Amino acid sequence: MHIVDPRGAEALENLIYISLPPAFDRDFGSFKPDPAVPLPVETAGAGSSFDPHSLSAEAIVAGMLRLLAWDPDNANAAYYRGFVRAVKPELLTVLSEAGVLKAKSHAWDVAEEIFLALIGLYPEAPEPLLDLAVLYEDHAESLEGAGEGEAAERLNEMAFERYKTLLSAEPPFPEAFLNAGFFFLRRKNWERAASLLETYTRIGAEGEKRDKAAAVVKSLRDRGYLDELFKEAYDFIRLGKEAEGLAKAELFIEKNPLVWNAWFLKGWALRRLSRWDEARTAFEKALALGADRQSEDEAMPAGDVYNELSICLLELNRVEEAKRALEKALSLEPENVKIITNLGVVAFRLGKKDEAAGFFRAALEIESEDHTAASWLARLEGER
């Protein structure tokens, strides 16, 4: 056994192994069972009793899927794979759809096990591995919005490892280039994103997705995201060197005075330098130049502009204006936990404690691991 994930070890504790009678002679299509190979069966949990009379094909298939998810290098993995694929040939489609639905409802662990099982069951198929990469990416994005940066970074690294595998596949798997391109776009690695999306425009099927990829590449070029000055400014600010970043942003503005994201960079640097009013002016300039009239896949989401603006307005004690900015941000990104939590903070500042509690509860419904919202909610409930 090669389990390193403690969750996998715990999951496999729920399996017992049975043997078929030596005289068992039933075939499953082209698959002939071997009584010498023990069959994993899923039980209610470690230490639970097992009633042989309750044995079903579903329990055996479930046991095999769990083993393939967490121990794909098991000595009998190929046998279990053949068994399940013969008994349940439709599982790739059925479980893929189930995994996607679980991920959309943020049942992350269940969705992960489904995709891991499919990878173990169909190691030659790239789709389950892509689904898993997207799952890790979406979960990371949810955690980032909840302020869980370290946990989000671990998941982003896990997504990155899956994308590396997918991008090296032969023959090339076009959808991997598309999804990896948007992954790097969200990670603010614009050059890598442009390269991958450009590749997709060459190898992907004609249609809406290819047009979308081409539009994003054009936007990255037209708006200066691939300009060295922009990248230097962004990296300086991200690394806490705001003064250097501001200087680069000013140079970028000289070259691109009508590009809204140039003013966003300036505002971001000024906000982190606590120069609230100057930052407010820069963010408002970005909005005047069309920051809120962009596509959903813009490299710098418009919700970020309004959120940054709201921080400045709060610091300037312009609370009602901060609220309006956050409401606009929420209309653009209705499930952004950071924005919802900030609306709760603004409501609290306005003395509307019940409304604030409602925002914090809404944030926790979307992301139960949001410690900021949980902390605020506990504070409010403690005051009652």
Image: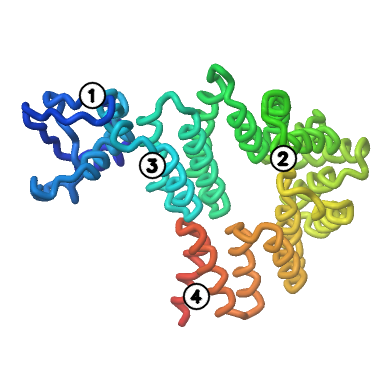
Name the residue beneath numbered marker 2: 208
Most extreme residue toward the bottom, as rendered?
Answer: 384
Residue at left 53%, top 67%? 362
Q: Amino acid at mark 4?
A: Leu
Q: Earlier in the sequence, mark 3 or mark 1?
A: 1
* Observer-nearest of 106 and 240: 106
Left or right: 383, with 188 as reference point: left
- Residue 190's spot in the image, x, y percent? 71, 33
CB within 8 Å, label 2 to label 3: no
Name the residue beneath numbered marker 4: 380
Q: Earlier in the sequence, mark 2 or mark 3?
A: 3
Residue at left 79%, top 55%? 275
Label 3, residues with CA under 10 Å away: few <14, some 14-19, many ≥20? many
Label 1, residues with CA under 10 Å away: few <14, some 14-19, many ≥20? some
Q: Earlier in the sequence, mark 2 or mark 4?
A: 2
Left or right: 345, with 16 as reference point: right
* Observer-nearest of 268 and 276: 268
Q: Earlier in the sequence, mark 1 or mark 4?
A: 1
Q: Which mark is residue 164?
A: none
Residue at left 83%, top 39%? 249
Can residue 230 be seen at all in this image of the molecule?
Answer: no
